Amino acid sequence: MFLTVSHVDVCYPGNANPAVNGVSLQLKAGQIGVLIGPSGCGKTSLLRAIAGLEPVAAGTVQLSNRVVSQPGLTAPPEKRRMGMVFQDYALFPHLSVASNIAFGLHGQSASSKTQRIAEVLQLVGLEAEKDRFPHELSGGQQQRVALARALAPKPDLLLLDEPFSNLDVDLRERLALEIRNILKAANATALFVTHDQMEAFAIGDVIGVIQEGHLHQWDDAYHLYHRPESRFVAEFIGHGVFIPGVRSQSHGHLHVQTVLGELTDSNESFQSEGEGTRPCDVLLRADDIVHDDEAMVKAEILRKSFRGSEFLYTLRLRTGETIMAHVPSHHDHKIGEWIGIRAEVDHVVTFERQT
């Protein structure tokens, strides 16, 4: 592993609870990791601790096999061979694009600098803008200059703190895909902080979901969505609701009785809990519910949100439960109308019943 964070706490004076509490994660060389969570959850504090901008109160941060942070030891940022890209890009307004990129290339010959500037300009697709100044560039171009400047010294680890937060939504997702391609082309190891799920899914090989300083799950996007390990991850990632059920298991199969019928999962990895049943809450994603006029179960449309190719319907069952469903947009039903639905659930996810 290239980056190893082990049981790290980050504390601030005057705060009763740690900003980061017992976080452990690993990042392989060449991987892009993403930290995601609501505002104030501790993701930026963790990034700053990895960068050496905050000391750790407990645990260790290792780069390759070298401990760079532990209680009483904080190697300075300039000794960690890291690059950083900030929210506001921090470009020098009086320097050209090429001169901004050259800023981090200390101690190199003029020819080496020129060659490296040309390499990263080509990498980020800004060769034609090398003599322009930051105020002459679009927000997306400024972001790529900041990335080029951080990549120029060939850092061992690149840290990005909500780098797209100042851009509009459409540009953010497109630029996230561009940045991923650039990082992969550079074979860079990177850790990225965001509060936007689409950005996280677009850019990350592995994603960590943080709440109140705790890392709930460090996994790929598929498993965060289909196999959440905590109720918080299940609620935070994607559109989903919980309905009550009764859970049982037999012969490696999970069975859950619900108002939508029995849901079965033969692939769920769980330890046998013996015979018998127990109450549970079942996670249902919007893509688990299919609109079917012939279905026995009916639901009332409470809200609808047009998404182009589909609607996101919020529905209420006769028994009072609220669920959500993605429905093709040519099925344009009115609010208050009752429609038939059925469940098609490949991954049955349950949690302890909450009253």
Image (cartoon, helix red, strand yellow):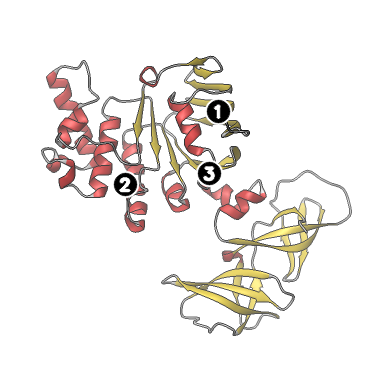
User: Of tags 1 and 3, which is closer to the observer?
Assistant: 1
- Residue corresponding to mark 1: 13
Q: Residue at x 55, y 82 (%)?
A: 335
Q: Is residue 116 above or below residue 41?
A: above
Q: Quadrant of residue 276?
A: bottom right
Kind of residue indicated by mark 3: Asp
Residue 306 placement (x, y as % from top left): 45, 73
Helix, strand or loop at disc 2?
A: helix
- Residue corresponding to mark 2: 178
- Spatial CA distance of label 2 from label 1 is 39 Å
Residue 1 placement (x, y as % from top left): 51, 25
- Spatial CA distance of label 3 from label 2 is 19 Å
- Residue corresponding to mark 3: 220
Q: In the picture provided, is 109 more to the left or to the right than 230?
A: left
Kind of residue indicated by mark 1: Pro
Q: Residue at x 59, y 30 (%)?
A: 24
Q: Is residue 40 above or below residue 28?
A: below
Q: In the picture provided, is 276 more to the left or to the right than 265?
A: right
- Spatial CA distance of label 1 from label 3 is 34 Å
